[in-house]
Image: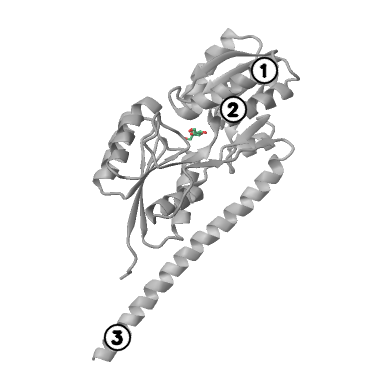
Amino acid sequence: ESEQSVWRIGVSQCSDDAWRTQLNREIEREALFYPGVSLEFKSAHDDSQQQIKDIETLVNDGVDLLVVAPNEVSAITPIIEKIYQKGIPVVLVDRKIDSESYTAYVGADNYEMGYQIGQYIVNRLGGQGNVVELTGLSDSSPAMERHRGLKEALTESGHVNLLATVDAGWRLQDAEQVFDSVLTCYPEINLVFAQNDRMGVGARNVAVRRNRSKDMLFVGVDALPGKGHGVELVSDGLFDATFIYPTGGDCVMQVAMRILQHKPYERMNLLSTALVNRENARIMLMQTQHIETLDGKIELLDKQLDEFLLRYSSQRMFLLACVVI
Ligand code: FRU
């Protein structure tokens, strides 16, 4: 019925977890403001070969624009170059590729965030101590950038040692596995920096089991709201701090639409981060709960509007039928 042109946006996520669920939900909610847009989501479950297939499927399905969080830099760069050269706009979210063949990027500056975390750690340890870092997949761009930033800040400090940097693939179970041997190798660890909260939880579980959790602080990244996530971990005193890694799904959708509608847009859309520590975790919990309620109401309104329109159009059909008779 609608006169509006229809746009199809494909979203290829590298993983499937609470952070991505929040991002996808924000994209969907923002899409409510753009009638005539349809979304198709895929998740590669941390498998680059799967992501290549997902991207090919989305392109074969005829999407007009691709939103993608590339699992690993070298594995995913070629397929993105290929589809970008076909003329399909590509919006990278959160993770990057090793090429200029993309239309726009939406996400935080992971190097800068790593650097800020490093500075926080130096301060927190009073300028000296031993740190262990758990990284995400070592060929994914946030893992590399967070590491570079952290290292830079610790090196500048002079007396905070980075004892070890270990790949735990962004996952809780992997972190539990690798951190067990880390604990055996290093008798004195003052702080664990996990590149995401999930791996921090894994590391902490092991430290609790080995009776060493009281000896060290845990710092993570993501700071998701909700049960068992980063903000609560800090508020409950299990983590020393975490840093907000903004999902920014609304921004992703806005940039995508500007591109599709041939309006001017920014190529680099940098989202900002912030420290969550015991000073502000409780207030953040309260505020995010409130936002969650409001988000739910927007979704409810949308559903009610749909039902109303459906009823309205069937009544109109009925009236038209009466007039014809
Ligand atoms: C979610 C996630 C986050 C992390 C980000 C890095 O899939 O693992 O926890 O901050 O990806 O790309």
SS class, disc 1: helix
Measure how far apart labels 2 and 3 are at the Cα level. 64 Å
Q: Position of residue 213 (x, y in %)?
A: 65, 21
Give residue 195's mark. none
Q: Is residue 226 above or below residue 308?
A: above
Percent x, y for residue 280? Answer: 72, 40
What label does residue 114 carry, if any?
Answer: 2
Quadrant of residue 162 in the image?
Answer: top right
The label on residue 156 is 1
Label 2 environment density (alpha carbons within 10 Å; few <14, some 14–19, many ≥20): many
From the viewer's perspective, is the residue at label 2 or at label 3 nearer? 2
Pinpoint residue 51: horizontal percent, then vertical percent: 33, 34
Q: Between residues 273 and 257, which one lies in front from this camera angle?
A: 257
Placement of 308 over or under 13, stated as above or below: below
Q: Secondary structure at mark 3?
A: helix
Task: Identify which residue is drawn at 72% across, 15% down.
Answer: 128
Q: Earlier in the sequence, mark 1 or mark 3?
A: 1
- From the viewer's perspective, is residue 265 above or below residue 183? below
**Does residue 240 appear left or right of residue 70 in this picture?**
right
Q: Nearer the viewer, mark 1 or mark 2?
A: 1
- Residue at 47% x, 64% y is 302
Which residue is drawn at the image coordinates 58% and 52% (left, top)? 292
Give the Cα distance between marks 1 and 2. Answer: 13 Å
Reading the image, the residue beneath label 3 is: 320
